[in-house]
Image: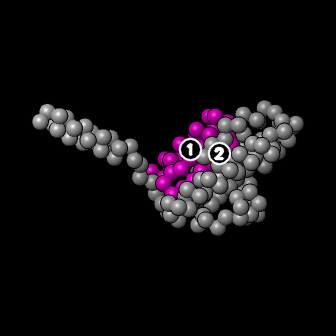
Amino acid sequence: MKTRIFLCLFLVCVTLTSCSQQKSYANDLPCAELMDAVEDQIPVDFGYETFSGDHLRYYFEDTKLPDDHCLRYSVRSEDINEFGIFHAPDDAAREELKRLTEGYLETLKSDQRAFIASYAPEELPKLERAEVRVFGNYVAYAILSDDDRKLAFETIEKKLTE
């Protein structure tokens, strides 16, 4: 009897803990609005530009998965700051976008490392620590300094949980 009570209490605790750790994210914010909020938090000299649609074609296997996206980079060539976000219409698209984004970062790390080292070696830690995170149906990536990357993801999460 004591074992059953203990087991029931344990299962209730596990259930409550797992439920409390799941966050609910908005699913209707435009990606450009999220990137504007990030850009406001981490300004750079000369500002940021938004990648054209060609960027998806060349670096993300010409994916048609996202129903919205916004990818930005620092205009100043000596600064490799880059961040972006995709909105996936469903779970399967989200997982595939995450895979594509991780692949994109791996490709940059292997293909661009020597080039970046030749003109801005102090920027390499940004590339090496580039990261992908998922917020509900949004897949975000950041090639930023440690502090800026943390702030970018915190900004996205805050906007999506307000």
Q: Name the residue under label 1.
A: 153
Residue 66 — which label? none
Decide whether residue 67 is among the magenta residues: no
Horizontal side of residue 160 vs 124, given as left or right: left
The three-letter code of the residue at mark 2 reads: Ala
User: Looking at the image, which residue is at 49% across and 47% down?
Assistant: 158
- In the rendered image, residue 126, in percent from the top left (x then y), is placed at 71, 37
Q: Which residues fall within the magenta stretch?
A: 133-162
Residue 128 image-quadrant placement: top right
- Image quarter where the N terminus lies is top left
Decide whether residue 136 is among the magenta residues: yes
Horizontal side of residue 78 vs 89, given as left or right: right
- In the rendered image, residue 68, in percent from the top left (x then y), is placed at 60, 64
Pointer 1 local density, CA inside 10 Å: few below 14, some 14–19, many at least 20: many
Q: Is residue 150 visible?
A: yes
- In the rendered image, residue 154, in percent from the top left (x then y), is placed at 53, 42
Question: Among all residues in the image, which is located at the extreme left?
Answer: 1
